[in-house]
Image (cartoon, rainbow, N blue to C red):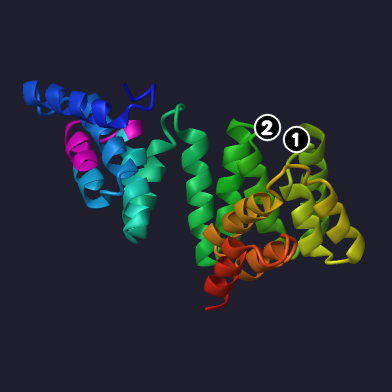
């Protein structure tokens, strides 16, 4: 049911499984995922902890523990969960990216860079890891290395708007502004700008997020709301 995106049915089945064996780790982890989707973060964390009490090194349970902890503002628990989740190849890439993002938000760009590098070492084509590495390099003042990363990303993922948005942030010229806008061909360009602005926002870069929103079509209600929120 979960793979079919029938989440309520999936949650019911996980609960049925736990009625038979309340310590069955895959069912506890599955239930934690369903609770997280329903924004029941405390319940998700509790289900994850039950799974971890049986198997401390379960990758899926640690990943959910980290995600729930992060949303609840428990950064230390999130770091613990993601750190152990990196030992599981199924979650290693995502966990390293989450750790990099946490330290970016803390302003510890060197530590964030080390996690982004580990993410890329495991998955050299992972766009998220490359984006996080590029951001770290820029914040550390190494714009030459950041530009090299953008060139690599452009070769592997030329449709990724991050490339042109980041170049515009680094050098906010009219040429870079027009180049960024000219590559957005879809019928809802404001959604593209919002998506990347929120990426910067989630990584603690409010000024960069606002700069991206300036590229969006003027006076779109959702864009105006987000601008107001970020200026707050």
In the rendered image of this protein, does residue 102 appear above or below residue 231?
above
Residue 206: image x %, image y %? Answer: 60, 69
> Would residue 157 be found to the left or right of residue 9 on screen?
right
Q: Is residue 189 magenta?
A: no
For the magenta stretch, what is the residue range? Answer: 47-60
Residue 125: mark: 2
> Would residue 13 be found to the left or right of residue 146 on screen?
left
> Would residue 188 be found to the left or right of residue 174 on screen?
left
- Residue under label 1: 157
* Residue at the limit of the structure toward the bottom, as seen here: 232
Residue name at image x 66 percent, y 48 percent = 131
Residue 102: image x %, image y %? Answer: 48, 56
* Residue at the limit of the structure toward the right, as seen here: 175
Q: Name the dominant secondary structure of the magenta segment.
A: helix
Mark 1, Cα crowd under 10 Å, few <14 / some 14-19 / many 20+, is some
Residue 165: image x %, image y %? Answer: 75, 55
100 or 28: nearer the eye?
Answer: 28
Residue name at image x 39 percent, y 22 percent = 3
Q: CA distance from mark 1 to mark 2?
A: 9 Å
Q: Is residue 58 magenta?
A: yes
Residue name at image x 55 percent, y 68 percent = 225
> Would residue 218 be found to the left or right of residue 10 on screen?
right
Where, by quadrant of the figure, is residue 154 drawn? top right
Q: Earlier in the sequence, mark 1 or mark 2?
A: 2
Residue name at image x 77 percent, y 46 percent = 184
């Amino acid at each position: 049911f979960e793979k079919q995106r029938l989440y309520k049915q999936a949650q019911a089945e996980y609960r049925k499984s736990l009625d038979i064996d309340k310590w069955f780790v895959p069912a506890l982890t599955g239930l934690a995922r369903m609770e997280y989707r329903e924004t029941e973060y405390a319940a998700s964390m509790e289900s994850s902890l039950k799974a971890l009490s049986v198997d401390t090194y379960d990758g899926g349970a640690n990943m959910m523990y980290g995600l729930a902890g992060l949303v609840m503002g428990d950064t230390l628990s999130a770091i613990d969960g993601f750190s152990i989740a990196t030992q599981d190849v199924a979650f290693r890439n995502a966990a390293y990216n989450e750790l990099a993002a946490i330290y970016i938000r803390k302003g510890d760009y060197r530590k964030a860079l080390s996690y982004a590098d580990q993410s890329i070492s495991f998955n050299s084509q992972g766009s998220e890891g490359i984006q996080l590495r590029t951001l770290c390099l820029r914040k550390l003042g190494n714009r030459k290395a950041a530009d090299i990363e953008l060139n690599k990303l452009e070769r592997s993922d030329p449709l990724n708007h991050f490339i042109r948005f980041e170049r515009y942030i680094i050098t906010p010229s009219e040429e870079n502004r027009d180049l960024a806008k000219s590559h957005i061909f879809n019928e809802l360009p404001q959604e593209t700008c919002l998506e990347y602005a929120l990426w910067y926002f989630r990584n603690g870069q409010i000024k960069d997020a606002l700069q991206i929103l300036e590229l969006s079509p003027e006076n779109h209600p959702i864009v105006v709301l987000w601008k107001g929120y970020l200026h707050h």
